Image (cartoon, rainbow, N blue to C red):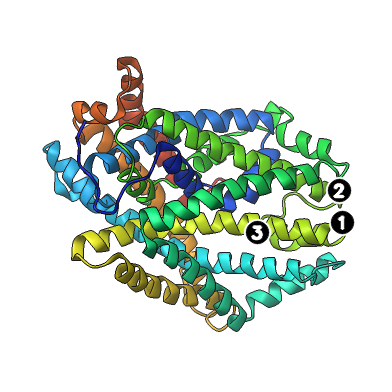
């Protein structure tokens, strides 16, 4: 195994890497999307299909990203270039890293706007502004927020500063320090909210919605949803895991570490569902309200329940932590590249990138008001950036990483990092060459050409 070290530093332990990568993976989608799609697609039956997809597609691609990062100890662009050269392949494979980093920057530009929404809701839940509101009033409040660019700008700016400050502080003093505090806090908040959900009288209904096995509800579309979410939930295809992998200690087992991350990510999503849906059902609300579930339905529910102000605030703090740790990981690969490429200080690289993504965020928050007439292929800036990153750039990156790891990287180098048994390595290699790229290609096709 190689003894290279990253100029950015390294994680203090395997568990810090697990928490950091889990923090990257656990985002807004875990809090509302995964529980909802589970309930709508057969409950326990969907969970089984999803876990199979995680094991067959998500985990193998994540292992590839980690070992490429750890082997080169560099940012995603240079890591792919170095590993390709080592395997006598073309340096052009580094374009995967460039595309992933660009996707991360574009995602952050609108993710920061959503993070700003969450910060705003922490404030209005804390001050009791949502106590006793009706669904119509809550909907009007959310709509009013979207149409208020000055308020959106304030919260978007604050969220951007919070994120850039952590990245600027470095791997150990910044990302690692926040991870040590925020991830345990996230787990504690989840358990507190789960305990609260058990007092609503509708916990059993929430449990059945998510876990009752109904194979009749499983369709081809359900399998596509499971496959797509298994890929996106682990922060794959954007260089984050590759960058985080470059800071991983050489003694840590990649296979065991990645399996742990996948398990924690799934566990958080399932527990979040068990914390949310009993509250929704106790108030006779629609569990399929999408983003409106978080910013309209839940504030109404909390506003009408005992201790709702306290637990509603805790819920949005939980969502804020999930959004923050994910946002940090979106900027890290590009900051690492700027530091290594231009030999500049990390704080300089972080601030420069922060200004760029903050400005892009203004275009996104303006999509709901003063820039609503600016469209790309019929979509406003916010929706367009969401579409091209989630539906094109990330799946394409996943396909290319699989093909690179399976067909370009020499087996001896991959096995040197992965340290798998011969049988497990053959299975992983088979996934990289065939299973994963074909599966993600199917996802990519149906994202662009959805089933009716």
Q: Which residue is mark 2?
A: 282
Q: Is residue 429 above or below residue 151?
A: above
Q: Which marked residue is nearer to the observer: mark 1 or mark 2?
A: 1
In space, the residues marked 3 and 2 are separated at their CA atoms by: 22 Å
The residue sitting at 56% across, 33% down in the picture is 50
Tell me if mark 2 has few (under 14), some (14-19) or many (20+) residues whose alpha carbon lies within 10 angstroms of its own. Answer: some
Q: Which residue is nearer to you in this view: 450 or 109?
A: 109
Q: Which residue is nearer to you in this view: 313 or 184?
A: 184
Q: Estimate the x, y position of residue 349 in percent, counting from the top left.
A: 30, 68
Q: Is residue 398 above or below residue 418?
A: below
Tell me if mark 1 has few (under 14), some (14-19) or many (20+) residues whose alpha carbon lies within 10 angstroms of its own. Answer: some
The residue sitting at 36% across, 54% down in the picture is 171
Instruction: Give the farthest residue toward the left.
Output: 88
Q: Secondary structure at mark 3?
A: helix
Q: Mark 1 and 2 residues: CB-CB less than 8 Å, in contact?
A: yes
Q: Which residue is mark 3?
A: 317
Q: Which marked residue is nearer to the observer: mark 3 or mark 1?
A: 3
Tell me if mark 3 has few (under 14), some (14-19) or many (20+) residues whose alpha carbon lies within 10 angstroms of its own. Answer: many
In space, the residues marked 3 and 1 are separated at their CA atoms by: 18 Å
Q: Mark 3 and 1 residues: CB-CB less than 8 Å, in contact?
A: no
């Amino acid at each position: 195994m190689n003894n290279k070290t990253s100029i950015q530093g390294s994680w203090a332990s395997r568990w810090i890497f697990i928490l950091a990568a889990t923090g990257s993976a656990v985002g807004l989608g875990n809090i509302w999307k995964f529980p909802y799609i589970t309930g709508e697609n057969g409950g326990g039956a969907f969970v089984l299909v999803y876990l199979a997809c995680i094991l067959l597609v998500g985990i193998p691609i994540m292992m590839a990203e980690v070992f490429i990062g750890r082997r080169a100890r560099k940012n995603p662009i240079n890591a792919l270039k170095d590993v390709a050269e080592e395997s006598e392949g073309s340096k052009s494979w580094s374009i995967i890293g460039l595309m992933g980093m660009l996707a991360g920057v574009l995602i952050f530009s609108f993710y920061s706007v959503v993070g700003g929404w969450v910060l705003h809701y922490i404030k209005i839940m804390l001050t009791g502004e949502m106590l006793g509101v009706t669904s119509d009033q809550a909907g009007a409040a959310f709509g009013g927020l979207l149409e208020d660019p000055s308020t959106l700008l304030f919260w978007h700016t604050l969220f951007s500063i919070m994120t850039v400050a952590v990245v600027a502080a470095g791997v150990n003093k910044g990302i690692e320090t926040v991870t040590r505090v925020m991830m345990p806090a996230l787990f504690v908040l989840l358990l507190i909210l789960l305990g609260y959900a058990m007092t609503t009288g509708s916990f059993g209904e929430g449990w059945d919605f998510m876990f009752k096995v109904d194979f009749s509800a499983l369709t081809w579309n359900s399998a596509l949803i499971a496959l797509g979410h298994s890929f996106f939930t682990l922060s794959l295809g954007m260089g984050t895991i590759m960058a985080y992998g470059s800071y991983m200690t050489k003694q840590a087992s990649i296979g065991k570490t990645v399996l742990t991350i996948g398990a924690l990510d799934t566990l958080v999503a399932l527990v979040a569902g068990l914390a949310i849906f009993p509250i929704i059902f106790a108030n006779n609300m629609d569990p399929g309200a999408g983003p409106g579930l978080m910013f309209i339905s839940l504030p109404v529910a909390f506003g009408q329940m005992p201790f709702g102000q306290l637990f509603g605030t805790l819920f949005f703090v939980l969502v804020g932590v999930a959004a923050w740790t994910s946002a940090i990981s979106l900027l890290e690969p590009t900051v690492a590249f700027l530091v290594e490429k231009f030999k500049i200080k990390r704080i300089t690289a972080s601030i420069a990138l922060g200004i760029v993504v903050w400005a892009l965020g203004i275009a996104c928050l303006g999509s709901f008001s003063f820039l609503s007439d600016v469209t790309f292929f019929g979509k406003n800036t916010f929706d367009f950036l969401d579409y091209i990153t989630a539906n094109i750039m990330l799946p394409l990156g996943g396909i290319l990483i699989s093909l690179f790891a399976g067909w370009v990287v020499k087996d001896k180098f991959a096995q040197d990092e992965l340290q798998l048994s011969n049988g497990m390595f053959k299975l992983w290699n088979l996934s990289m060459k065939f299973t994963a790229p074909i599966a993600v290609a199917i996802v990519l096709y149906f994202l662009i050409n959805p089933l009716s």
